Amino acid sequence: MVEKERREKLVLMIQEGCPHCKDEIERHREEIEKGEMVVRDLSKDDSAYRFALAVNLRYVPELLKITTDGRKVEICRLSRRDMKPAQCKVIDLD
């Protein structure tokens, strides 16, 4: 069995009308512009909205680190203070 490459993605979940979301976008402007972080707007993106429901996302803005290796997906909510994992959930794909 061939192992799949481990991939990580930083995702900033936002929603239209959220004042703190604008602050977070500005705070992470450099990462966003470099393509190191993706911004997903729950009010404009149905797949982001469904994902948020599936992982029980309750608040925005929410910074997530999503890691996959083809066998499992790890979704970590990151602390806005230091960007360290505050809570993680692993979903097995097997």
Image (cartoon, helix red, strand yellow):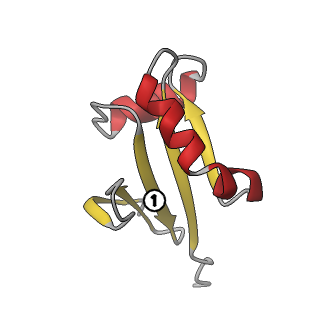
| View extreme (right): residue | 34
Viewer-proximal residue among 11 and 18: 18
Viewer-proximal residue among 51 and 22: 22
The residue carrying pointer 1 sits among few (fewer than 14), some (14 to 19) or many (20 or more) residues within 10 Å by Cα, namely some
Viewer-proximal residue among 64 and 79: 79
Where is residue 23 shown, x and y percent of the image? 49, 37
Q: Secondary structure at mark 1?
A: strand
Where is residue 55 shown, x and y percent of the image? 32, 40
For image coordinates 54% across by 49% down, the residue present is: 27
Relative to 65, is 88 on the left or the right? left
Q: Which residue is mark 1?
A: 65
For image coordinates 66% across by 60% down, the residue present is: 36
For image coordinates 42% across by 31% down, the residue present is: 20
Viewer-proximal residue among 19 and 46: 19
| Amino acid identity at mark 1 | Lys
Where is residue 44 shown, x and y percent of the image? 60, 18
62 shown above or below 84: above
